[in-house]
Each structure stands twice: as C-alpha cells, then as structure tokens.
Image: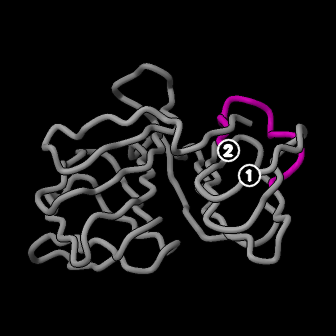
Amino acid sequence: MHHFDVETLAAGRWLNGGGTTRQIASRPVGEEEFAWRASVADIDREGPFSAFPGIDRTLTLLAGDGVRLSCPGVFDRLLQRTGEPFTFSGDLGLAAELPGGGCRVLNIMVRRGRATARVEQVTGRVVPPAGHAGVLHVLAGRWQAGPDGRVLTPGQGVWWDEDTPAPAGAVVPLSPDASALWADIAPAG
C-alpha cells in the first residue's frame, strides 16, 4: 500500500484557473491515456468544468459548503453532504457554482472500457479485492493501514495498484468516529 497525505501532495493549477489539483495516483504511470486517476481538487471559483471525453468521474465533497454541478437538459446537482459520491460522464460540459465559497473534493476518474469505479463512504474494515486497484481517503477518526500498521488521520490515506497482489491485511477503523471514502477500481470486463 502506498500512503499519502493530501497536504504534502504537490498542487497544480487548473488550466482554466478555477482551482488546483493534488494528484494521489495515476495508472499507468506517466501515460496521458490513464486507465484510472485519483486526486483531490480545491475548487476556488465558479465557472466551466473541463470535459474529459471517454472518462467516467466520481466527485465527493471533502470540505466546504458544496458545489453545484449542472449540464443543461442533463442534470443539476448540488453536492453539499461530505462523503456522498456523485458519478457522471466526463464527456459533458459542466458548469460549477459555489454557493458558500470554495470547496475540496475527491476526484476519481476511470477510462471507459479500461476500468470502473465504485466510491462509497465506509465506517468498517476494508479488505481490497485481488486484481482491483483502490484508494482509501480518511474523512474522520483514526484508521490503521496494511501490514506496517501505520495510523491514518483525516486528509491521509492509502492507495494500491491492480497489478500487485492483494495488499496484505486490511484497512481498519481505530476510533468510533472513523469514516473514510473507499474507491474500488476494477478492470473493465
């Protein structure tokens, strides 16, 4: 398992200037045509969302008062509850509104035909399935990850590759208030 702390990940500015992205992982490494990618984005201002043709996206609010995503004639969705994932096609040209100012989201992207993702909020033990990649991002409480027993707190997490054997052990909650986002990323097939 690879550990991360969002605050130590390098932040890159969006091309449209509306926010920054901190990449957790992108697989395969160094390829523009990624199969999957996980990042944390800080949305600083309202405006258009970049389209990602051929990509399915899941955004989950981590902090802030939320973001309204809209695509005329398709959907109008306000993400205002921390930990509630929303999946949509990256083919769509979206507009983002920030009713309460800037916010932070977990962004999971998978290339259609190569991978699928299911993101859910969890409060119990997570055992990664063999052959799947994944990301676990701590929302609250304390968690213990993998064979090295590292303790994770909010804003930290772990990720693993689908090409490696199933990570030894599990990710387990250590406190009664423990809550995390788990993105299970499976090969398409």
Q: Is residue 153 shown left or right of residue 46? A: right
The type of residue carrying mark 1 is Leu
* Cα–Cα gap, marks 2 and 1: 9 Å
Residue shown at 45% from the left, 45% from the top? 39
Region of the chain picked out in magenta, as a range: 159-171
Q: Label for residue 158? A: 2
**Secondary structure under badge 2?**
strand
Query: Of the residues under marks 2 and 1, which one precedes in the sequence?
Result: 1
Q: Residue 85: x and y, percent?
A: 46, 70
Residue 169 drawn in magenta: yes
Q: Dot 2, crowdedness within 10 Å: few (<14), some or many (≥20)?
A: many
Q: Is residue 134 shown left or right of residue 54? A: right
Q: Residue 47: x and y, percent?
A: 11, 59
State if disc 1 and disc 2 touch (CB < 8 Å).
yes
Q: Residue 4: x and y, percent?
A: 62, 39
Q: Quadrant of the N terminus?
A: top right
Residue shown at 34% from the left, 53% from the top? 42
Establish if 60 lies above or below 74. Answer: above
